[in-house]
Image: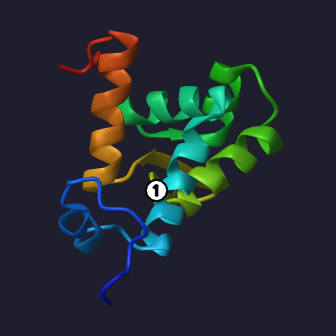
């Protein structure tokens, strides 16, 4: 990282923090994940998929929404890497991705909602 000529010295060692400052790209990726979670419907779908693998039709029925509307939410969640899908015949099943980020989101949701995982 290049040396910055900061206009003020407040006695704090900002250079240490600046040396570890995330890149704009990293911050944009995290912001996109939070953007997905800022939608209540997507958050409900994600919470459901933290606890089971399900097809679009069953998710739609549970959310009381149309298949196309749920499919749109699933696509955006999948694009951020929070969920994954697999095909079995004509059905596509969705579940929480097996990534550290997805696991953290699951844990945070349960703590915020104060809901214990129903499968434990």
How many numbered discs, if any? 1
In the rendering, at what x and y percent does residue 112 appear?
A: 37, 17
Which residue sits at x=35%, y=47%? 102
In the rendering, at what x and y percent does residue 94 appear?
A: 50, 47
Could you say which quadrant of the image residue 20 lies in?
bottom left
For label 1, the crowd category at 10 Å Cα-Cα, with few meaning under 14, some 14 to 19 and many 20 or more, is few
Could you say which quadrant of the image residue 58 lies in?
top right
Colouring of the image: rainbow
Q: What quarter of the picture does the N terminus occupy?
A: bottom left
Frontmost residue, 12 versus 16: 12
Which residue sits at x=46%, y=56%? 30
Which residue sits at x=68%, y=35%? 57
Image height of 30 relative to 113, above or below: below
Report helix, strand or loop for mark 1: helix
Frontmost residue, 38 versus 11: 11
Residue ranking furthest to the top: 114
Frontmost residue, 78 versus 119: 78
Q: Is residue 107 left or right of residue 97?
A: left
In the rendering, at what x and y percent does residue 120 appear?
A: 17, 19
In the rendering, at what x and y percent does residue 11 appear?
A: 20, 54
Which residue sits at x=45%, y=28%? 47
Could you say which quadrant of the image residue 21 lies in?
bottom left
**Residue assigned mark 1:** 30
Image height of 120 relative to 11, above or below: above
Image height of 95 relative to 22, above or below: above
């Amino acid at each position: 990282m290049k040396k910055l000529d900061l206009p003020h010295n407040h006695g704090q060692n900002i250079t240490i923090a600046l040396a570890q400052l995330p890149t704009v790209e990293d911050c944009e990726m995290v912001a996109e994940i939070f953007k997905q979670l800022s939608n209540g419907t997507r958050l409900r779908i994600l919470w459901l998929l933290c606890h089971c693998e399900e097809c679009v039709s069953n998710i739609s029925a549970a959310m009381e929404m149309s298949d196309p509307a749920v499919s749109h939410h699933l696509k955006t969640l999948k694009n951020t890497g929070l969920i994954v899908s697999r095909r079995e015949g004509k059905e596509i099943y969705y579940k929480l991705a097996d990534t550290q980020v997805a696991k953290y989101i699951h844990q945070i949701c349960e703590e915020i909602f104060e809901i214990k995982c129903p499968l434990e």
